[in-house]
Amino acid sequence: MKLTTLLSIAAAVCVATAAPAPKPSKKDPCAIVATAATSATADLPFDAVAACYRNIPYNAKVADDLLTTLRQMTNDYYVFEDSANGRYKAPFNTPRVNFDVELAKIRSTKWKNDYDFNMALSNLFSSANDGHLSYKSNCYMTASFSQPLALYAPVVKGKQSIRVFSVDTTNANAPKDNLVDCEVQTIDGQPAIKAIQDYTDKYSGISKDPGVRLNDALASTFWTDSTSWTTSGGGWMTRLDVPAKSSMEYTIKCAKGGVKKYKIPWRVRPSRRMNLHNFKDTPGYWRANCAAFEQPPNRVVDRNNRDDNEAPARTFFKERGTLPQPRGPRNGPSDAPPESPITLANEIITTTTTAFYRMKKGDACVAVIATESAGSQAEYWDFIDGLKRLRDSGCKKLIFDMTNNGGGSIDFATFVNALFFPKAKPYFDMDLRASSMAKQASKASLKFSPGMSIFDGRGYNSTRNGLAFKDDSMFTKSIRQTRNNKTNDYTQRSFFGYSWKMLPLAKNDSLPWKAKDMAIVTNGWCGSACTQIATRFATTQGVKTYSIGGIQNRPMSYYSFPGGFVYQHMYLVDEFSMVNMKGKNVPKSLPVQGIASYAMGQIYADGEKSVPLEYDTKHFAAKVKLDFDPATARHPDLVWQKIADDFKK
Ligand SMILES: *[C@@H]1O[C@H](CO)[C@@H](O)[C@H](O)[C@H]1NC(C)=O
Ligand SMILES: *[C@@H]1O[C@H](CO)[C@@H](O)[C@H](O)[C@H]1NC(C)=O
Ligand SMILES: *[C@@H]1O[C@H](CO)[C@@H](O)[C@H](O)[C@H]1NC(C)=O
């Protein structure tokens, strides 16, 4: 066993250092990948990975099971199945998606291989631009592709262009020239900004706003939960989907000198999704990385930690990783922590969710909320403590920076709303699909302890009287709604009950800030639970909102995919087994390894009115849209200072 491992390492070294374009070979491409994939940092040959994916034959039985499962998911549980079938006004720019029709088309198509079939499914789900919704097979996400150039789209002298944000010098394909802030004019023969927008419109899937999708493709500076400031390279430079060609061609113009051409190969490495050392050829690849496990792992649904049920947009954002950071101070010890990009503000305290700052000049403070993933009550206390310190330092204004915040616990979001606006309702009214299956599950759940099943009405409070439902009437006394030619049954309106020992704050210890003393800024990548703070502050209290980046001269949203709440398909399967339901319409596990996930609840900003917030265009745009420039893109404190100055106007 040991010996074979050693041999395959030796063989892999040869492959990895061989010429970049391997000669066509009759050899099984998955065998070539297997030989090269000696470790998580081994380089894989691009063409072999692409050919290995396409070497998986289309299997009619697996495809049929998969389509049936996904059709049930959209038909019976996905809460935006009907909304997605509509046409919406700017600043939305999202295609109309009819899941019924599109899944039927995919079913009736003759597919050359399993890869093409799966890509059609993934792209269909991604086209709805809902960060909670995704279908992706693990089979075609086992390699990670990266370019060394992190790009961004600042506005310089009144004109937006694509420029180099930084160069990842740990990537062996990085050009030796200093390209930082040089202008990227074309990529693969197209204007750079168009190439990136077209790509992200197809693959990002996080927002109905093309400006937010553009931000998602590009580099961004942000504070990550409880650690430090860092940079994400964005979805353009690091991807799991196979690029069209093995290298990318750029024309780049620096301040000095003319236009230069660069042809940079993709670096291809195993992603964390590759089951290393467990396959030797195509059939083995299928068994290790694609086919569903024969015995699905035992799962316990932890309802207090819905983080298990994370939005796929957030999962994929995290999987892209972050760029290596300059270590500081310059000329200091090499193990010093990364240099902070923040110089105009002093850090007061950091917690797992939030970094608290006080501006050096003036009377504004900043709460940088990176996540709503607060698993314990201690984190709620820490959040209050941070705010009290800002208050006690004399801050009269409070800015929330919620850039690259992928959500977390709805209870924490509700808590933040209640903390700042104790007199206002802290939640949005919500409903779920009340399909015939959901109704049956709701009835069946009454035999078990209250709230154990997600379909148990007793786990929700009614918006009518504020109290928990006592029976299955939330589901069974359903409300029929017609949207975009689709008629579905929905539950009674509800919300998740809460109780926090720490609220309300004592009168002599309350927070000083009113809505007019606050502002919110994001790059639009504020999803799920993040939106339940940002949009509640803005739509019900009139807190001023800023969005930054995106497309020049186009209004942009400060949030994406509010949904209601997200559910992974695998947990849906558990829900039915928990209440002992069986039969052909009960959701089955996916026949492949992968992610299927959807929004199960939807929320409404305007009470009884019928447009869910996810599709409510009138709330969408931020009050103020800012552009990035080379300085603000790297130093969020410059943006905070600008917003602090705006308070004085
Ligand atoms: C709704 O259905 C009617 C009748 O089938 C059809 O004529 C109309 O075009 C449909 N509208 C939309 C928005 O799909
Ligand atoms: C929710 O319902 C429970 C049980 O009826 C009740 O005790 C609680 O006060 C309600 N409200 C909230 C905000 O949780
Ligand atoms: C607020 O009042 C309570 C009792 O009325 C007292 O125990 C507490 O110390 C006071 N807190 C502050 C911050 O003054």
Image: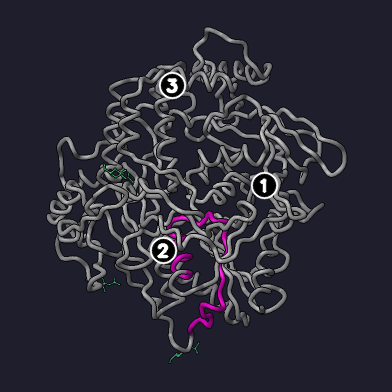
Residue 141 falls left or right of residue 231: left
Decide: is 381 above or below 492.
below
Residue 243 falls left or right of residue 164: left
The label number, if any, that marks residue 152 in the structure image: 1
Q: Is residue 512 at least partly visible in the picture?
A: yes
Q: Which residues are magenta?
A: 510-538
Say which residue label 3 marks: 285
Q: Earlier in the sequence, mark 1 or mark 2?
A: 1
- 517 drawn magenta: yes
Quarter containing the C terminus: bottom right
What secondary structure is found at the residue carrying circle 2? loop
Residue 614 falls left or right of residue 328: left
Looking at the rendered image, the disc whose residue lies closer to the viewer, 1 or 3, is 1
The label number, if any, that marks residue 376 in the structure image: 2
Q: Earlier in the sequence, mark 3 or mark 2?
A: 3
Q: CA distance from mark 1 to mark 2?
A: 37 Å
